[in-house]
Image: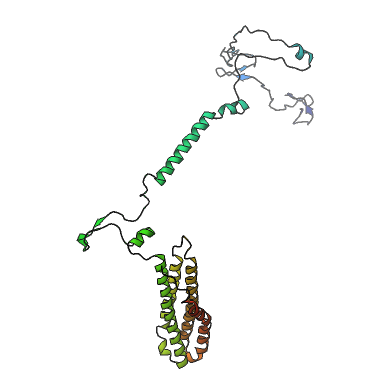
Amino acid sequence: MSQACLNCGRSLPDGTVVCPYCHAMTEVTQKISLGDLTWCPACGALVPPEEVACPKCGRIVREQEPPRPVRELDLPEIGETEEDAARTGVMTRIESAIPPVVDESSPSARRDRMPRPRAFAFAALFAVAIVGGAALLITHPWDPMASITRASEPADTSMSGFPGLVESLTGQDRDTEESDEQGSPSSEESLAQLHETLGSLADKVDESEDALRNACSDGDGSSLDGGLEDAQSTSIAVSNAIATIGQIDDADGERAETIDHLLTLGNWLRNRCDALTDAWDIAENASDLTAASGQVISRLDSATDYRMLFEQNYDAWAPEAD
């Protein structure tokens, strides 16, 4: 790259100090490429790239790596086979006495890491032992009384006003035979008692309904006090009776028909209770009983069919005593 003279403006070769045309000083600093030259850290002289020591002071500038020792081995010469020599571009096979390092991703390495069948068998036996032991610990078949929660230890009640020992509490669960021996009611007796309970509840519903009809016909609102609460109590008692009927033990199926009959009677009576409760609610919340009497009577009449069905089948569906 040429440079221009600052005086005449002509192009000058690189490195020109005095212009050959106007003899003016170019006043340009020359650039010298050092390349691979090295400065001597001792004297500051430039050291050529092929020199190891400084030519001025003799200090070592470039450290030479010591030659790598080479061990000469007496290995047999391996030549090309006739088959490899006949093909173009086949590299000469080199055999090594050092076994190769097995790659972790190679099929042989993965096969070597697989557990042996003996390990599988041991793990399976260990798992069976753990699960079986846990099952035995939970079920404890050697102690059949461990799962019984009722009190069975005799207690001395002489200091509590009851003479003698109490073997077990009378209100706790027992087998059917044990209950029958100690006087607890059987299923047949329970069904008969529930039949009588439904009859007495039906009488209460009749009395409540008659009282409400009379109050509506007289227009006397003072006779309504407590009627709604009584109707609601009777309805709750009917629902409890139905629930008790459904809990009767009928494992052999001999009482299925009787239980169905009692459940039907209970549902008819509960439908009457629903209508009766609604009628009492209308009557008590009415500002004028005479004006609301038509609505009250209409609600009571909606359950007349249930009353007729109950009265027609109550005696016929009475449980038969043993």
Quadrant of image for the C terminus: bottom left
- When the figure is inspected, residue 43 is found, relative to residue 212, above or below; the finding is above
- When the figure is inspected, residue 43 is found, relative to residue 1, above or below; the finding is above
Asked whether 277 or 242 is in front, the reply is 242
Query: In this rendering, does residue 210 appear at all?
Result: yes
Asked whether 167 or 87 is in front, the reply is 167
What residue is at 51 percent from the left and 81 percent from the top? 308
Residue 299 position in % (x across, y down): 52, 83
Quadrant of image for the N terminus: top right
* Total count of labels: 0
As drawn, the residue found furthest toward the left would be 159
- When the figure is inspected, residue 286 is found, relative to residue 234, above or below; the finding is below
Residue 315 position in % (x across, y down): 46, 77
- When the figure is inspected, residue 297 is found, relative to residue 39, above or below; the finding is below
Using residue 139 as the reference point, say whether residue 84 is left or right of it: right
Residue 115 position in % (x across, y down): 54, 30
Res 199 quadrant in image: bottom left
